[in-house]
Image (tube, rainbow, N blue to C red):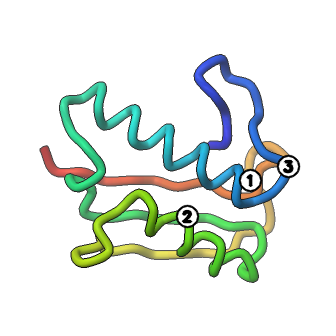
Amino acid sequence: MPLNAAGEFVGEDVEAQLRQVFTNVSNALVAAGAEMKDVVKLTVFLTDIADAAVYRTVRDQFVDTDNPPASSLFQVGALINPKFRAEIEALAVI
């Protein structure tokens, strides 16, 4: 979710939200002794499929583009907070 470490909403635009979400995923992995290269599957939820190109641009800054994780991308009607435009689930093998 696009929340910072203090639990505050981050990002009025989808790019900022996606950067925060990927940062959160990365931080959670580091806390577990892993890193982004250990992610084997991403499940992505966007409220507007038109944001898929922005998602790919941001994703490519966080993953190994030569060996990216498998992924599924879904458009959803809404997320838990009406301000949220993106949510990502990551599965890592450590």
Q: Dot 2 corresponds to which residue?
A: 58
- Left or right of 88 in this view: 87: right
Residue placed at 29% from the left, 32% from the top? 30
Give the quarter of the image for residue 5.
top right
* Amino acid under disc 2: Val
Up the image or down, 59 lies above or below 72; here it is above
Residue at 24 percent of width and 29 percent of height = 32
Residue ID at (50%, 38%): 24
Quarter of the rendering containing residue 10: top right
The quadrant of the rendering that contains the N terminus is top right
Q: Residue 17 at x, y = what percent?
A: 69, 50
Compare marks 3 and 1 and give the one earlier in the sequence: 3
- The residue indicated by pointer 3 is 12
Q: Earlier in the sequence, mark 1 or mark 2?
A: 2
Task: Characterize the local packing of mark 2: few (<14), some (14-19) or many (20 or more) Cα atoms within 10 angstroms.
Answer: some
Mark 1 sits on what residue?
Answer: 79
At label 1, the amino acid type is: Leu
Q: Is residue 25 left or right of residue 94?
A: right
Query: What kind of element bears circle 3?
Result: loop
Q: Position of residue 42 (x, y in %)?
A: 40, 63
Please, what secondary structure does the residue beneath circle 1 have?
A: loop
Q: Is residue 5 above or below residue 41?
A: above
The CA span between labels 2 and 3 is 16 Å
Q: Does the CB distance between marks 3 and 1 fall below 8 Å?
A: no
Along the viewing direction, whichever of 28 and 60 lies nearer the viewer: 60
Quarter-of-image position of residue 70 = bottom left
Identify the residue at image location x=24%, y=51%: 92
